[in-house]
Amino acid sequence: MTYVGVSAGVSGSVAAMVLVVAVVAVEFGPGLPMALCVGWDRPGWYVVGGLFAVTGLLAPPAVGRTRRSKATRSVSTPVVEQVASAS
């Protein structure tokens, strides 16, 4: 079963944690920047800008780590190729 980018090989507790994080992000994600920018005015904009900057700085290392971890895992041959090679 695949949900929110989590494959079936992941343990149930990790999949549940990813699901909770996704639900929290969807529910509170739009309201947090709005509350900061409207409620705090200029300092709120600075906080939102800082969050975007930190996210932008952390994204490339996270993608690189994911690529490296996927490269080290064994990839199974798709069923189509197995059927084609068997005949």
Image (cartoon, rainbow, N blue to C red):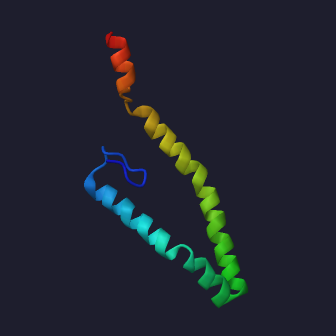
How many numbered markers are drawn? 0
Q: Nearer the viewer, residue 22 or 40?
A: 22
Residue at (46, 33) in percent of width and height: 71
Instruction: From the top left corner, tell me how far across and down residue 65 is, in percent.
Output: 50, 44
Name the residue at the top extreme.
87
Answer with the quarter of the image where residue 15 lies.
bottom left
Residue at (49, 38) in percent of width and height: 68
Answer with the quarter of the image where residue 43 lies.
bottom right
Q: Nearer the viewer, residue 26 or 36?
A: 26
Instruction: From the top left corner, tell me how far across and down residue 3 is, in percent.
Output: 38, 53
Name the residue at the right extreme.
42
Which quadrant is the C terminus positioned in?
A: top left
Say above or below: 83 vs 27. Answer: above
Say above or below: 15 vs 32. Answer: above
Name the residue at the left extreme.
12
Residue 77, can we see it? no
Residue at (50, 76) in percent of width and height: 28
Q: Is residue 48 left or right of residue 27?
A: right
Q: Is residue 63 left or right of residue 71?
A: right
Answer with the quarter of the image where residue 79 lies.
top left
Instruction: From the top left corner, tell me how far across and down residue 44 is, in percent.
Output: 66, 82
Q: Nearer the viewer, residue 79 or 50?
A: 79
Residue 37, can we see it? yes
Residue at (36, 12) in percent of width and height: 85
Q: Nearer the viewer, residue 21 or 30?
A: 30
